[in-house]
Image (spheres, coloured by chain):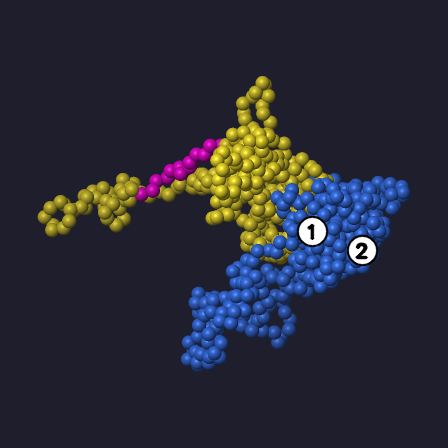
Chain colours: A blue, B yellow
Amino acid sequence: MRRISRLGKPSGARLAPTARPLAPLCTPRAAATRPSPTPAAVTINTLRFYSSRQPEPLPASLTSGGKSAAAAPESVEELAAEELEVQQFDHQSQQRVFVPPPRPSVAERADTITDTLYTPATTAEGLESIGGLGSWWDDPAHWPETSDFVGFKPKHKVQEPALLEAAVRRALTETLVMKQLGQEEQLTGIWGLQGKAQHDAVLALDIRVDSDGTATVTGDLHAVADGLVVKDGEPNVDSADVLPSAAEALAWKQQADQSWKGTSLQDARLKFAVIKRVMQLTGQVVPDQKLADIATARGLLATLSKPPKPKTFSQEIETKKQDLVALPNVAFSPKRVTRGHKDQALGRYKLIEAEFRKRDLQDGPLSVPKSREKKHWNGEA
Amino acid sequence: MAGKGARGLTEALRSLTLSTQSCGQVSSRLPSTFSRSMATEATLPRATSNLTTTSMTTPWRPSPSVPVTVYDFQSYEPQRLEEWSSKHLHLPMRRDILHLAVIFEGDNTRQGSANSKTRYEVHGSHKKLYRQKGLGRARVGSKQSPLRRGGGKTFGPKPRDFGTGLNRKVYDLAWRTALSYRYRRGELVVCEDGMELELPQEIAAMVEQGQLRDQALVDGFKAKWARQVLDSHEWGRAHGRSTFITTEWRENLFDAMDLVPNYGMALDIEDVDVKDLLTTGRLVVEREALAEMIQRHQSDLCSKVFINGVRPSPPETGKVIVE
């Protein structure tokens, strides 16, 4: 049981309620080309989140524990057996996640029915049409939201600068703690997420930066390091539940000491760990070509907090050119103003539609584009 | 324009300095002040100091390698950091060379099988339709004349090869330029080997037990699952589609991508060409496939000529830094 915790519950991977291992619908060919995993490998691999990683390069951080390292080392087979038990137990306790359609039933033949009142139908009129199975999985009763794919990144990307800063500070502190405690191997592993209390505890640690950018963390390091290890029966959390609100982050940012931003990230291992953790917390991916330019925590922040480019011109005006919108003689509309919009503004639109309907000229709203009207007239969907 | 002009001037000055004299000499040769022999009223001009900074004395050297993060495919978890050669993934953009390569590929992809019949190939008798004179009608020859309906085509298309040539080294350079272009824009995602869309085991069990006998059910599941995975990683339709490149056919991944063409496409390494590398929003490449593509397209980097009995080796690439 103990080892399950170390297999990681990353960013909101809600494993407890929906834990289900993954397997490809393997064809013989695909199976032949991929190395056949041992049972141990399968469970170790799949008890993580939706990961297709091959089990061979299992990180040492996952096989040798921190505090429990004193325990006698067990073979991989034993671990696997242990995990299989857990898995079976979990499966018994949990409900079925994906609901397949019921088996098709075949109606009796008309000539075998003994009921004398029965008269076979000669037309399809009045028969209920139930459709095919093409949209079976769109029904939330068949595929509940809890069964959705969960990756390493959180569901929602963090964009607020203050929140990003808090997340970077947290990632940096955690990484420095692990490094200071000599747990170098765990720097590239997966760390657990805990509630806001843990977040506050991490941010409360003090970072002192030397002139050469070397940082030292002071405080209760072991408490933070313990928080990074995922424990058994730990409630699953999403990154959104872990990070503070934007207002709280802003308040923290205003009173926090800014010297930590000078921490050097020249050490590739440190930088990798920080960026990986930031990705897990915020969903922000740092592109490879920017990695080389990031020398300090400040540089990382600058890379992250650049807001995304607006996709359309109207979005740009809405977000960045509010002074234009505020002008008294300027009206702003995100879409082209058409005849329909003008009529709507005047309250004439409903009248026109009603008159059209009376004369049986226009079916549907006026604002529908011509091509779609044409489709409707032709009886298409 | 003004900004560009000023930058261009600075660059020109810098290159002039570097090309004409060694770096150490630069600062010593630049005069600190001008002097005049004759006394004048005007103040002496000072040498502009912003050009004589260290930026002129230290030449810019591009890094020989660039970092590449290798991700786990389905979860998008960063697994390790590697160093790849700049000559493979950090080449300058050459739009002209990319154009050459795309045109070359297009030419060679043309089927060139259009075929029309000349008057000699159209079926029928070649007899003169009616006599030359005495009918008051225009003179005619055979029924197959190009002037007549149903006649032959005068200069119609005939099957031919539209293929053109391109020097191998240029084509290989284009290939790596396309990859470099993707890298620079942050649109090259390198994933672990064995990239495959993993479906929940529960679904696999259902298929085995015959609970999902309808192919529409399996397809529907794969399509929805693929959409969720791609949306979660910001690779999907809303983010400009993605091209998946693997070393070989992967059942679930390729099936699923065929089912959701709005979300991208999956290609076997044999099917990829330069145009494919430039088409969608990003490339999601298996590490092995990327290495193979580069290995196949570096003829301009490693000469076939043996020097002192040794063939020059290609640049070192794919070195693991952090694991």
Is residue B208 visible to the viewer in this orientation of the structure?
Answer: no
Q: Position of residue A213 (x, y in %)?
A: 74, 44
Residue that mark 1 sits on: A279
Q: Residue at x 85, y 51 (%)?
A: A220
Q: Is residue A130 magenta?
A: no
Q: Position of residue B37 (x, y in %)?
A: 49, 34
Q: Residue at x 79, y 58 (%)?
A: A200
Which mark is on residue A204?
A: 2
N-term mark: 1 or 2: 2
Is residue A231 visible to the viewer in this orientation of the structure?
Answer: yes
Q: Nearer the viewer, residue B88 or B233?
A: B88
The prevailing secondary structure element of the residues shown in magenta is loop
- Give the amino acid type for the residue marked by disc 1 in the picture: Met
Q: Which residues are magenta?
A: B156-168
User: Dot 2: within a 10 Å radius of its alpha carbon, few (fewer than 14), some, or many (20 or more) residues?
Assistant: some
Disc 1 vs disc 2: which is toward the camera? 2
Question: What separation in Å lies between label 1 and label 2 (alpha carbons)?
Answer: 21 Å
Q: Position of residue A205 (x, y in %)?
A: 81, 53
Q: Residue at x 63, y 45 (%)?
A: A290
